[in-house]
């Protein structure tokens, strides 16, 4: 394998014009597809087979003109001091007339008519429901909402629009700029050369451009969440820079030993490139493994991000050597005054990495115990983790969504922002009215966390009862609404959903009817439980596949086992930190939050998958150099020191770069992207420095030669991947020795 990769790297170096043109053409093609075929993203998180989504399907089936998953807007009005909503009813009615478009499901009642006026009379809200999902709202729909706000403000009222109708697709341009800026500084310090620092950035940006444009093109054919392209960009940029960094570092070493530049490029791809391939494969396995969950939006995120990582690997193996061919010897010269270029391959240099690992090896037991203790303490908050779908409560302070949410919370209670809908299917009920009355009686008996119960029949007049009876006969459907006292993402609301379901569980046996709890809050509860159910299966499959891959790479049982156990510590630190900052509110202002919020419902599973792949990156890059030293005859404990010293500088730079990229996304406005970026930033730092650079060398120093144990029968059965490049070294022969490199190529 190393020899084939050598040939690929050398060929790309020599035929650099062909390789560069092909990649630029792919970028142009992907960009053209994005411009002409891209559609809208869709953040409606629903799953088939859940009670809440079955209720949506039933409503659509019985009432085809409605769309329970359609966009909603809540227009909140606040009267001036000394006036009431009723005093301004005419102005509000006139303003609301502007909201009506062809996508609006039903007439919009003003707050006075709908009874949604606060006790002091100064605040009221109107609810607008649409027949289309948020991603399909037209510009006319959004312009109409803006017009309502303008008319209300012209009349002297304060107005704010909440709900998902005006949600903007998150853009991470600023985050990417921050990440690139941090990466450039780190690369400058690492290589001491503008040319060398710029190449990993250039290849990563091209890879992200191709991947992002490809994902954007897909939105014209399939529904993708707004997080999908952001996650892809986040990972593509991080791993793209890191993979190119590893190959660039090895190339500089090979060139400085006197190899012709084309051979140096081939040798770099044949050795460091082998590690890049297997590191990339672990990330791809972890991301593609999200499809095991059977959850569509997670599968899409995973596959899109995996494709982005695959592009990053291919670009590092081909485009980077091509660009090195254009640069010639310029990448070997320090161009920044005051920045010293060090070759970590030179064992005569007492680098900081060598001094660190020698200290860890000497004090291996304290290092191991201390590292595990630190990880365990930071992981404590995981025990109190609460999951939920983000809502307007986490929108940036001062935004329309947040203002509307806060006004409703302050004047109507937090639960008014997330009502629960109980759908009663009376198709199989012998006495339909009696079934509905039974549900009403049961719901009326639930007192905990219920602010209000709104039945389908709110008046006792004979006319109303006759009309309701006729409706039951026609559609066999009745809807109750419960306003909780607690907010949509609060644990008390989740308990209320389960209480309602338990209370109505016997309805089919008693009346023949069935009741289902739905609404976006109930959908969030159901999805969170579904994710919790599939998480163990996902963990077993993904870790199992990666374990097999690492056994092939390292030809050891204990090294992959150690890697997997260390990963669990990293995940604990990452999720524990997210709980402490986002849910508990510790230092949350540092990431731009002024409220506490439950943990993003997909975070544990998504963070586990992504972080597992990235953790194995560092494991592969660090430990392959240790194994390379061991295979070439170095004593086991000394091999740990030599391998660590050779790779620590580059791995440290890679971890800081990846941290910078993820931290940039953590500073954005969208809470979903912010949470993912923060979790990955903390997880990467914890895995690189706490686990891979402290705990791993300590464990390997404790076990010694036994860390490379492999049963003889398994050793004979496994293919020899030669990731250390032994066969390649034999074919190339020893390096000529340090001298001015010779440029070879066309």
Image: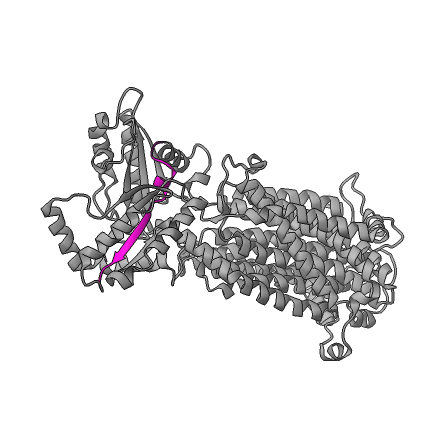
Instruction: Using the rendered view, name the quadrant where residue 156 is placed.
Output: top left
Along the horizontal axis of the image, is 374 left or right of 414? right
Question: Which residue is pictured at 22% across the width and 39% down the height?
Answer: 109
Which image quarter is the N terminus in?
bottom right
Instruction: Using the rendered view, name the quadrant where residue 734 is placed.
Output: bottom right
Along the horizontal axis of the image, is 397 left or right of 307? left
Q: Tell me if residue 641 comes above or below residue 410 in the rendering.
A: below
Along the horizontal axis of the image, is 663 left or right of 66? right
In the rendered image, the residue lying farthest to the top is: 82
**Residue 265 place in picture, x, y as percent:** 74, 61
How is the rendered protein coloured? one colour
The residue closer to the viewer here, 706 or 297, is 706
> Within the magenta stretch, is there residue 186?
no
Q: Tell me if residue 149 comes above or below residue 250 in the rendering.
A: above
In the rendered image, the residue lying farthest to the right is: 348
**Residue 495 place in picture, x, y as percent:** 42, 49
**Residue 721 place in picture, x, y as percent:** 72, 72
Task: Give the extent of the magenta segment.
Answer: 411-427
The residue closer to the viewer here, 458 or 102, is 458
Question: Which residue is pictured at 21% across the width and 62% down the height?
Answer: 429
Which image quarter is the C terminus in?
bottom right
Residue 675 appears anywhere in the view: yes
> Within the magenta stretch, is there residue 426?
yes
Residue 194 appears anywhere in the view: no
Q: Tell me if residue 53 comes above or below residue 401 in the rendering.
A: below
Along the horizontal axis of the image, is 264 left or right of 543? right
The residue closer to the viewer here, 328 or 487, is 487
**Residue 55 place in picture, x, y as percent:** 31, 57
Marker count (numbered): 0
């Amino acid at each position: 394998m190393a020899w084939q990769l050598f040939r690929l790297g050398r060929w790309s170096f020599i035929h650099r014009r062909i390789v560069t043109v092909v990649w630029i053409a792919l970028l142009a093609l992907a960009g053209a597809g994005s411009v002409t075929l891209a559609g809208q993203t869709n953040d409606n998180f629903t799953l088939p087979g859940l009670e809440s989504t079955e209720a949506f399907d039933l409503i659509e089936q019985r009432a085809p003109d409605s769309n329970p998953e359609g966009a909603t807007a809540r227009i909140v009005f606040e009267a001036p001091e000394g006036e009431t909503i009723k005093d301004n009813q005419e102005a509000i009615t006139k303003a609301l007339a502007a909201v009506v478009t062809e996508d609006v499901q039903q007439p919009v009642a003003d707050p006075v008519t709908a009874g949604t006026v606060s006790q002091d009379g100064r605040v009221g809200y109107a609810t607008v429901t649409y027949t289309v999902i948020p991603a399909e709202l037209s510009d006319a729909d959004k312009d109409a909402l803006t017009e309502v706000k303008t008319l209300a403000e012209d009349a002297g009222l304060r107005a704010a629009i909440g709900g998902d109708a005006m949600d903007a697709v998150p853009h991470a341009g600023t985050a990417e700029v921050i990440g690139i800026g941090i990466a450039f500084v780190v690369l400058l310090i690492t290589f001491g050369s503008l040319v060398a620092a710029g190449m990993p950035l250039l290849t990563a940006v091209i890879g992200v451009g191709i991947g992002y444009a490809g994902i954007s093109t897909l939105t014209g054919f399939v529904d993708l969440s707004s997080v999908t392209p952001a996650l892809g960009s986040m990972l593509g940029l991080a791993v793209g820079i890191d993979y190119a960094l590893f190959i660039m570092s090895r190339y500089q070493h090979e060139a400085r030993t006197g190899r012709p530049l084309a051979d140096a490029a081939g040798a770099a791809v044949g050795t460091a490139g082998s590690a890049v391939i297997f590191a990339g494969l672990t990330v791809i396995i972890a991301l593609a493994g999200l499809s095991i969950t059977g959850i569509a939006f997670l599968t899409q995120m995973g596959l899109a991000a995996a494709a982005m990582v695959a592009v990053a690997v291919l670009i590092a193996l081909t485009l980077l050597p091509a660009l090195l061919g254009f640069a010639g010897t310029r990448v070997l010269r320090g161009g920044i005054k005051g920045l010293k270029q060090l070759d970590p391959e030179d064992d005569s240099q007492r680098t900081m990495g060598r001094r660190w690992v020698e200290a860890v090896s000497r004090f291996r037991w304290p290092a191991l115990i201390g590292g595990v203790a630190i990880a365990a303490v930071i992981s404590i908050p995981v025990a109190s983790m609460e999951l939920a779908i983000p809502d307007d409560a986490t929108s940036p302070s001062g935004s329309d969504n947040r203002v509307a949410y806060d006004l409703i919370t302050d004047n109507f209670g937090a639960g008014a922002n997330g009502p629960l809908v109980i759908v009663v299917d009376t198709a199989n009920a012998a006495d339909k009215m009696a079934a509905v009355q039974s549900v009403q009686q049961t719901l009326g008996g639930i007192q905990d966390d219920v602010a209000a119960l709104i039945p389908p029949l709110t008046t006792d007049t004979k006319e109303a009862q006759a009309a309701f009876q006729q409706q039951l006969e026609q559609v066999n459907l009745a809807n109750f609404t419960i306003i909780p006292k607690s907010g949509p993402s609060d644990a008390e609301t989740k308990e209320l959903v389960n209480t309602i379901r338990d209370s109505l569980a016997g309805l089919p046996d008693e009346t023949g009817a069935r009741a289902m709890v739905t609404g976006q809050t109930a959908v969030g509860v159901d999805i969170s439980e579904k994710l919790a159910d599939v998480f163990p299966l996902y963990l077993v499959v993904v870790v199992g596949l990666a374990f097999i891959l690492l056994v092939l790479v390292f030809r050891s049982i204990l090294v992959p086992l150690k890697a997997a156990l260390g990963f669990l510590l990293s995940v604990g630190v990452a999720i524990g930190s997210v709980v402490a900052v986002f849910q508990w509110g510790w230092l949350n202002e540092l990431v731009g939050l002024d409220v506490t919020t439950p943990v993003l419902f997909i975070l544990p599973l998504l963070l586990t998958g992504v972080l597992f792949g990235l953790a194995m990156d560092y494991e592969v890059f660090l430990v392959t150099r240790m194994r390379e030293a061991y295979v070439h005859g170095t004593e086991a404990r000394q091999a740990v020191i030599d391998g660590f010293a050779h790779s620590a500088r580059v791995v440290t730079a890679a971890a800081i770069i990846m941290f910078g990229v993820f931290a940039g996304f953590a500073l954005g406005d969208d809470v979903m992207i912010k949470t993912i970026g923060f979790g990955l930033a903390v997880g990467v730092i914890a895995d690189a420095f706490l686990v891979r650079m402290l705990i791993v060398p300590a464990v390997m120093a404790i076990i010694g030669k036994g860390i490379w144990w492999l049963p003889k029968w398994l050793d004979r059965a496994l293919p020899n991947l030669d990731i250390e490049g032994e066969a390649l070294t034999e074919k190339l022969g020893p390096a000529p020795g340090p001298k001015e490199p010779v440029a070879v190529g066309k």
